[in-house]
Amino acid sequence: MQFLSRIEEMLLLAIWKLEDDAYGITIREQVEKDTGIKWLSGAVYGPLSRLRKNGYVQTKTVKGDTDTAGRPRVYYSLTPLG
């Protein structure tokens, strides 16, 4: 059995709360809201990558639009394991 870090647990909870709107920035903002701790912009991507690699989350890339200045967004959702 593999144990999750506290950060990974917080990210899973944030993804669960955000439902269909869980991408990097919104996940970071949700964790900041829940904990009151400021996070650096890129701080969530390493743990999110581990969660994906270990099967706790899955990703879906959506083409960018005018809201995102043409850049694609990677949305995260929980798997049954997550």
Image (cartoon, grey):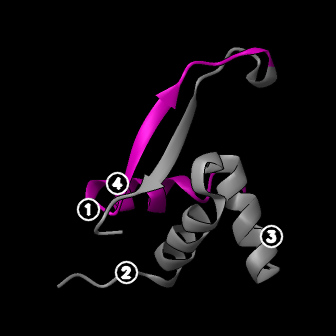
Q: Amino acid at mark 1?
A: Asn
Q: Which disc number belongs to residue 4? A: 2
Q: Considering only vertical position in the picture, is 33 above or below 50?
A: below
Q: Position of residue 7 (x, y in %)?
A: 53, 76
Please give the label number shown on residue 52. Answer: 4
Q: Amino acid at mark 3?
A: Lys
Looking at the rendering, the stretch of residues picked out in magenta corresponds to 40-66
**Spatial distance from mark 2 to mark 1, Cα to Cα?**
10 Å
Q: Which residue is mark 3?
A: 38
For disc 1, the marked residue is 54
Residue type (three-letter) at the residue carrying disc 2: Leu
- Mark sitting earlier along the chain (2/3): 2
| Gap between marks 4 and 2 measured at Cα | 13 Å
The residues bearing labels 4 and 3 have C-alpha atoms spaced at a distance of 23 Å
**The residue tagged with tag 2: helix, strand or loop?**
loop
Residue 23 in sight in this render: no
Sequence-first tag of 3 and 1: 3
